[in-house]
Amino acid sequence: MPETKKGAFDDAVRYSCGELHALPREKRRRLGIVGSLELKPISIKDALAIEQNALVHATVISRLSAGPVNLSPVESQKRRKLYEDETCSNCSPAPAPGLGYLLSSSPYAARLSTQTYVELCEEICELLNRDWQFSPHLRYASAVILAKRLLVNGQAAIVNTVEQYGRQNTVEIHRESFVLQKGQPTITSLPPSVKTPYPKVWPVAVLTIDGKRLIIGTKPLTTSSLRLDRVAEPSIGASTPSYVLPDTSHPLASKIFLDAEHLEIGLRMAENKDTWSVLRNDLLYQLRQVKTMFFDAPTFYLCPALSFFADNHTCQPYSIFSLAALDQAHSVDGVAASNVFHTIACDVIRDGSHAVLKKERVQ
């Protein structure tokens, strides 16, 4: 069973995926996914010498070539029993292309089956990249749009919490830094010079002193995520070790799916220039996990957004502003310091740039 010689390598891959007539963008993305999984097309001929193509891992090809092979489909797992709180497949909307297997095989399939996802499109990419100096309310709208998104490229994760940060000092004091190390530029969330699947939207893992941070360039930092393709501990905080993007080929092969409900809410928020927070409740839990620059009002922007896995305060990453409210906070000094920052945050949210910290408030 030699590797296929039927046409070009790319055509064999597309034939195996049933996408010979797909759009060019979908074809390129499928090739990237196949390459990242180290799959190769093989040629299979029946008794009439009619040839078909299939994809297998490179390590399997030599074993298949050793002798006669009987081919048969591997049936999917036994259909899950539908419980009373689940929606039957006849009533559920069809999943977005590329999501069907994930949504049916995930350990969280019952919960995910109640959601509708759509792939990120160019129009939304343009909205996510608009200038915050002229449209500051979009930092909140884009946070809502990107929360609860799915990242898929052989591994799959849902983003539970996203925090918005700018790239320029004139827009955001807690901006992403762009520096040289040993004369070489460091890895940032800026998209590469090659054409990317989503214009100016680029998932990347940036190495920092806290670990690898999962950032979606434009501007959001993932501070809580959960693997959907297997059971794993959630990643909480500034680092995201559970979702790996080791090199440029992996982001190129990644698909981004948005929650349809969050997308609709975010688009409505984008029309309201008076928006100043993502939600009206739990305001202190909408403050970002920052460590410095508490003298500057933008430090207190209320622009994290949450998925349904983290839609109450007990499931959210805590910050210096919310540690005081944590039931199991073991550090007495930490709680005392958090109470001070909690007070400062309340004053800034209430009074803005006119806020003043009075001595009697912290004694």
Image: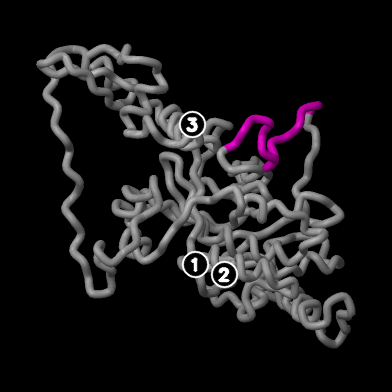
Q: Amino acid at mark 2?
A: Ile
Q: Amino acid at mark 1?
A: Glu
> Does residue 211 appear in this view?
no
Residues at marks 3 and 1, CA–CA distance in whole angstroms = 29 Å
For the rendered model, the colour scheme is: one colour
Q: Residue at x 49, y 31 (%)?
A: 28
User: Is residue 289 rendered to the left or right of residue 47?
Assistant: right
> Does residue 52 appear in this view?
yes
Q: Amino acid at mark 3?
A: Arg
Q: Provide the residue designation for mark 2.
A: 265
User: Is residue 84 rendered to the left or right of residue 112?
Assistant: left
Q: Provide the residue designation for mark 3.
A: 28
- Could you tell which of marks 3 and 2 lies nearer the N-terminus? 3
If the image is split into quadrants, where does the C terminus sit?
Answer: bottom right
Where residue 293 sits, quadrant-wise, is bottom right
Secondary structure type for disc 2: helix
Q: Are marks 3 and 2 in contact (CB under 8 Å)?
A: no
Stretch of the chain drawn in magenta: 182-196
- The x, y position of residue 63, in whole percent, is 23, 17
**Residue 261 - label:** 1
